[in-house]
Amino acid sequence: MGAAVPAMFETVLFPIDQSRQTMETAAVALELAKTHGSRLVVLSVVEAEEGAMHDAAAVAKLLEQARASFEQAGVPCEMLEREGKPAFVIGDVADEINADVIVMGTRGISLESSEPSTAARVIQLAPCPVLVVP
């Protein structure tokens, strides 16, 4: 018999925010992790800007809702919370955890539509493929 074929996506990184699109994208991350038996890492990045309001309770609630959804579907996940510029943090964490793919939406809660989306920046910075869900 030949050697076992390694999983295509051993580690899936799923950055989340409080946008509506996060839940739609979660379904894709869930299906990918379930299909490939992947390690699923859910990441929340809090942007640390002067004057920005950081609602720790809202972030904790978001992470807990994500964990409950994934575990209810039979996919255990790891939760990470980091602070910084989202695109850079997502790229750094992907490198840190040896992510095989990043699954994210096209645009999160950013209101600055003239700025490139976080997804566009992540595509440029990521050490692995990025699956962008419209």
Image (tube, helix red, strand yellow):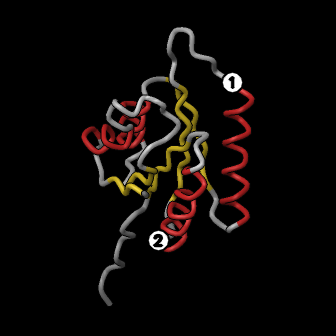
Q: Residue at x 71, y 32 (%)?
A: 58
Q: Measured along the vertical axis of the image, is residue 82 above or below residue 69?
A: above
* Three-letter amino acid code at the position of disc 1: Asp
Q: Secondary structure at mark 2?
A: helix
Residue that badge 2 annotates? 36
User: What separation in Å lies between label 1 and label 2 (alpha carbons)?
Assistant: 34 Å
Q: Measured along the vertical axis of the image, is residue 8 above or below residue 106?
A: below
Using the image as rendered, state which of residue 78 and residue 130 is in the foreground: 130
Which circle's residue, 1 or 2, is located before the other in the chain? 2
Q: Is residue 42 left or right of residue 128?
A: right
Q: Which of the image's four quarters has the N terminus? A: bottom left
Residue that badge 1 annotates? 55
Q: Measured along the vertical axis of the image, is residue 3 above or below residue 54?
A: below
Using the image as rendered, state which of residue 47 and residue 126 is in the foreground: 47
Q: Position of residue 102 (x, y in %)?
A: 40, 51
Q: Nearer the viewer, mark 1 or mark 2?
A: 1
Q: Residue furthest front?
A: 114
Q: Residue at x 48, y 31 (%)?
A: 111
* Three-letter amino acid code at the position of disc 2: His
Q: Which of the image's four quarters has the C terminus? A: bottom left
Q: Is residue 67 left or right of residue 78?
A: right
Q: Measured along the vertical axis of the image, is residue 46 above or below residue 16?
A: above
Q: Residue at x 42, y 61 (%)?
A: 10
Q: Position of residue 128 (x, y in %)?
A: 30, 50
Question: How many other residues sit within 10 Å of disc 2, few (<14), some (14-19) or many (≥20)?
Answer: some
Q: Position of residue 66 (x, y in %)?
A: 66, 50
